[in-house]
Image (tube, rainbow, N blue to C red):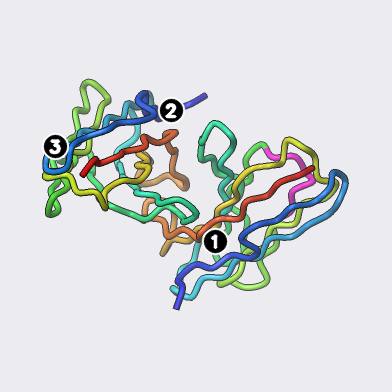
Amino acid sequence: DTAVSQTPKYLVTQMGNDKSIKCEQNLGHDTMYWYKQDSKKFLKIMFSYNNKELIINETVPNRFSPKSPDKAHLNLHINSLELGDSAVYFCASSQRTASEKLFFGSGTQLSVL
Amino acid sequence: DQQVKQNSPSLSVQEGRISILNCDYTNSMFDYFLWYKKYPAEGPTFLISISSIKDKNEDGRFTVFLNKSAKHLSLHIVPSQPGDSAVYFCAASTYTGNQFYFGTGTSLTVIP
């Protein structure tokens, strides 16, 4: 039973399309995150939600919109995809804030053609 | 603005020998540090942590050392095993903060 699961694992799409990545955690954690790992392998936070409330919103284009229907789910919707959006996106969760260790999903490899 | 740096992108070590992975940070407010291990096509998994009140934390074959004055930490793996071959990420935070800052990872290859 996977603790943090995200779908799809691979996503190949054309420029200009809109796509979503879903994430669910069954750990009972209060906080969920989206991280982006770019081509330089730099793992950078995008968003963080605590009990469905947005607490971190880094400098990310507003084409990226997170949605948290409940504290076990944090989805990422991306509008008007661009070539530079190609990356691996990781969902993660922690018990409370980031002072607790993170549990990561297996990642979504997004390729924009 | 990369606050956590891992300057060695890769490291190769013979099985049974010691692996030493290094990490430097710039923010003196960081007081909590973690190491994550990542296999291909999987997410990072927590390995070991250390708080700034300690200079060493040990868990089996894994030991993390923290040198606050140098803003440097290292992960020692002894003895190294082929199954340790993975990418290792260093991460830092403050206890009152709300996010971790990650390094770019070091790819460790343990040669049988």
Give neighbour class at mark 1: few <14, some 14-19, many 20+ (Cα, 10 Å).
Answer: many
Q: Quarter of the image for the N terminus of chain A: give it.
A: bottom left
Q: Is residue A16 left or right of residue A7?
A: right
Secondary structure, mark 1, is strand
Is A63 included in the stretch rendered in magenta?
yes
The kind of residue tagged 1 is Asn
Residue A1 against residue B7 in the figure, above or below: below
Q: Which residue is situated farthest in the right direction here?
A: A16
Labels 2 and 1 share a subunit: no
Q: Which contiguous range is marked in magenta?
A: A60-65
Residue A102 percent location from the top left of the image: 41, 56
Secondary structure, mark 3, is loop
Q: Give the labeled residue for mark 3.
A: B18
Disc sitting over residue A38 in the figure: none
Residue at x 51% of width, y 36% of height: A41
Residue at x 75% of width, y 57% of height: A77
Q: Give the labeled residue for mark 1.
A: A50
Question: Closer to us: mark 2 or mark 1?
Answer: 2
Residue B51 percent location from the top left of the image: 23, 43
Question: Closer to us: mark 3 or mark 2?
Answer: 3
Q: Which residue is situated farthest in the front direction here?
A: B112
The kind of residue tagged 2 is Gln
Q: Give the labeled residue for mark 2.
A: B3
Q: Which residue is situated farthest in the top direction here?
A: B70
Disc 1 sits on a residue from what chain? A
